[in-house]
Amino acid sequence: MTSLICTLQDHRDDVNWCAFSGKLFATCSGDKTLRIYNTCDFSELPFSPLSGHGYGVHCCCFSSCGQFLVSCSTDATTMVWSTVTGEIEAVLEHPGRSPVRICALSPDSAHLVSGASDGTLALWDFPSKQLHRTGAVSDTTMVALSFSPCSQVFMSGSSYGDLRLWDLDMNQLLAEKNAHDLGVTCCVFAPNILSGQLKTAKGREKGNDMQQRAAGGQVVQFRLASCGQDSHLKIWAINKFSSGGYKMQLLHTLTGQSAPVLCCAYSSDGQLLVSGSVDKTVTVYDANNAVLLYTLNQHERYVTACSFSPTLPLIATGSMDKTVNIWRLEDGCNDHGGKSLPEQSALTSSEGRTSAGRSKLLVSDWSEGDVSTWLVDESLEGLVDKFRANNIDGTELLSLTKETLASELHIESVGLRSKILRKVEDLKSDSVCSGIPDEFLCPITRELMREPVIAADGYSYEREAIDSWINNKNRSSPMTNLPLLTTLLTPNHTLKMAIGRWKTSH
């Protein structure tokens, strides 16, 4: 299901971080440089490498439009680079001149936050590059930062092992002081904003949440992944109440790696989660169900960086072996060298495929061969040749009428025509209870998505449906009613593959 497509070997020291934009890919290293590549063929840009930091570069991230690249370093600065020219646009000196270990841009590119070795945080207004607020956690080193998809809050993680949620005024909203024994190494928000009934990990609504709901307040939920020196990857729910309060709840603890987990990243649709470890492995999980999908073994030393492409079915992993591997997610492909698949991945193969799905939406995707198989299953094998001669696929099957059966398929028996239509109606009726996962349905049409895309609000939609919505609804979000910052739609390859896997197994 995954294949190693290329290995980048340009850095001369440990690779500390990697990041994708829509068209570019960036890496940074202990060799004091950043490198930028085209994602079309992973050729290095003419002005790469970027040299400007005096010490090793710990982290890098792109602005939402991809026009800027931000990096931070032991030299106590955070730099802003132009991805068009490779020139330095700004040098932001961290308050106190402490080594900067981590930086993160908000999804709307309005704010930049940096964290340092002395436990301080600096929040910058990104358009003006001016310092907005500072904060601190004493006796620790800031090593992890991530903004929520709404850009209004961010999470920090430290070497002390705590996770803390902050607002844009640097007020601390909540703290999970023992999130990871021996220290947090990375944290990242999922791109989705969720809502609905709040449940515990065991599916029961808790008392405080019930009180919040009883008061009529709306609840919004974010998902956060964190990893640490305890060799665990954890998935958390961050619940925001209309009263302004926040609550943090542990949903899953993933133990697929045998040594400290150094990095983690969500796919652009929030469906997949990748992590890299001191045990030299990369693991890929189904984030919603906390199921290990793949274990990739290719790096020779610690895996320190990982990232998903927002537009292509690609994962990048960086290591202390000075290399960066680019992996392609290939739904339904045979095994390739450079990886090992755990037993769970067999569930995504063709094993267990039924001869015909029992969903109207799935039936509409049937081929002529699928229709023929269904006819045999329903003891109508005598009609196979007639249906094939008329090129009846799933869509045509669902639209059959007595008239078309008589005039086009030339089925003269009234009883046989009625029998066919009854079975088609049964097929449609069965589809009501098909149990299609809600995240596979377009929020606008409530139908199974064929070409899912991610809009600026972070939600995934069927391309045709969201295109129509944007054209007719003045660029408002179907889910939040807020204006969309951009009408750019990003193909959701991960979700499309997940839908394909679900259809295969049903």
Image: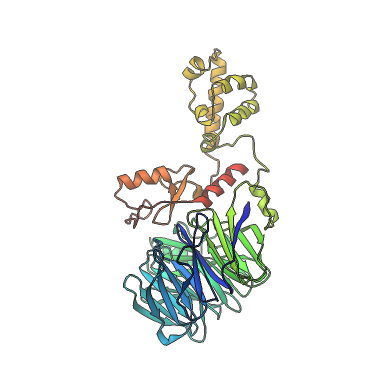
List x then y, in percent, for residue 13.
Answer: 58, 74
Answer left or right for 211 relative to 184: left
Please report the residue visible at 51 percent of the width from the left and 64 percent of the height from the top: 206
Please report the residue visible at 32 percent of the width from the left and 51 percent of the height from the top: 475
Answer left or right for 216 relative to 184: left
252 w.r.t. 440: above or below = below
Please report the residue visible at 39 percent of the width from the left and 78 percent of the height from the top: 92
Q: Nearer the viewer, residue 166 or 493?
A: 493
399 w.r.t. 74: above or below = above
Its colouring scheme is: rainbow
Answer left or right for 494 relative to 93: right
Q: Which residue is outermost to the front?
A: 46
Residue 123, by quadrant, is: bottom left
List x then y, in percent, for residue 193.
Answer: 44, 59
List x then y, in percent, for residue 42.
Answer: 53, 58
Q: Which residue is outermost to the top?
A: 412
Can the viewer see residue 245? no
Quarter of the image for the C terminus: give it.
top right
Report the number of discs: 0
Q: Nearer the viewer, residue 55 or 308?
A: 55
Residue 241, by quadrant, is: bottom left
Please report the residue visible at 53 percent of the width from the left and 52 percent of the height from the top: 494
Q: Nearer the viewer, residue 282 or 345?
A: 282
List x then y, in percent, for residue 108.
Answer: 37, 64
Residue 422, by quadrant, is: top right
